Image (tube, rainbow, N blue to C red):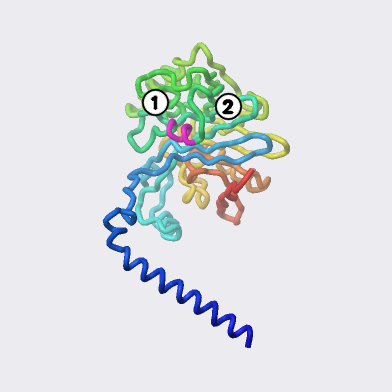
Amino acid sequence: MTIEKSAMNRRGFLGGALTGGAALGVASGLNLISTGAQAAAPMAGAPMAGAIRRKIGNFEVTALLDGYLSMGPELILGYDEEAASQLRKAAFIDTEALTGPVNAYLVNTGDKLVLIDAGTSDSLGPTVGHLGKALAAAGVTPEQIDAVLITHMHPDHLFGVLTPAGEKMFPNAELLLPEVDNAFWFDDGAMNAAPEQFKPFFLGARKSADAYKARQTLFNPGKEILPGITAKALPGHTPGHVGFVLESNGERLIIAADVVHTLLYQTHYPEWGIAFDIDPAQAVETRKKFFDEVATDRVMFAGAHIPFPGFGYLANEGEAYRFVAADWPYTF
């Protein structure tokens, strides 16, 4: 009896409170409306700057979103519409073109702030070129960057070392470039043999690199180029295309750059390439080898065009791979 009475008392109290609250709301409703207390906030009109940080051993690694590019079927080598449409349907994608992010990665080693790739600046249109906003969201200014490591010298990786006005974006940074890639983009014979639409890539790469001539280092893969950061050869997309292996306190992350462009397609069909691959056959060979490596070793990797923030793993499922996004870094 006591329990029943108590329960009824609670119900009566709650009912009375709700009734009283409702009456108060009705009585004061005109006043609330007139004072604007229930007015909707204005729409932001733009996405928030992309910056997500996680720990790799003692390193802090922050994914930075420069923006996005559209990748339609015409850019995909080996494309098969029937196979592609099945994958898009399963992924709830209604358009033929995939949206590909442009990611860069900031590494705080404890001694240095190191930026891996620099985005596009104003070279590829208004949907990209927002790395500065992402850096600001991460609480970092361009002046604080000690070194900029470049995976390859394409516009969406290198051209962001310059401002739209052509000034150095990172005035205190050393620029580190893969030696083989640098030789290719400064080769007049290669530029003259390239299709006309690709010649601005050569000119822009030279302009970007030359701006840092006073503080520039060329490196080759297979060596530790900064403490805890080793360059890894991943050729094909460009002749000197590299990734970076970060190792700290027993943990490892591979920044794989452009091994993957269309994650949805290439995990199922690694033999599909991208129109910007300079050596498509070698790019496919590199991708297959890399996929097997990270799946076998269960190592985390990140890519420049993997959906932001780009951290994840690959599971081998026989004839295809399954990408598993890395768990959200809830806390340090």
Q: Position of residue 293 (x, y in %)?
A: 64, 43
Query: Is 90 above or below relative to 191?
Result: below
Q: Which residue is mark 1?
A: 201
Q: Position of residue 49 (x, y in %)?
A: 43, 39
- Give the magenta-colored segment's residue range: 132-137
Q: Residue at x 49, y 44 (%)?
A: 308
The answer to whether residue 284 of the structure is visible from this angle is: no
Q: Quadrant of residue 311?
A: top right
Amino acid of disc 1:
Phe
Instruction: Tell me the quadrant of the picture where the C terminus can be found.
Output: top right
Provide the secondary structure element on which disc 1 rests.
helix
Q: Position of residue 279 (x, y in %)?
A: 48, 33
In terms of sequence position, does the residue under pointer 2 or pointer 1 come before the other? Answer: 2
Distance between mark 2 and mark 1 Cα atoms: 28 Å
- Residue closest to the eye, 301 or 248: 248
Identify the residue at the far bottom of this view. Answer: 1
Q: Which residue is mark 2?
A: 113
The 10 Å Cα crowd at callout 1, few under 14, some 14 to 19, many 20 or more, is: some
Q: Is residue 62 magenta?
A: no
Instruction: Tell me the quadrant of the picture where the N terminus can be found.
Output: bottom right
Horizontal side of 123 relative to 110 (left or right) equals left
Provide the secondary structure element on which disc 2 rests.
strand
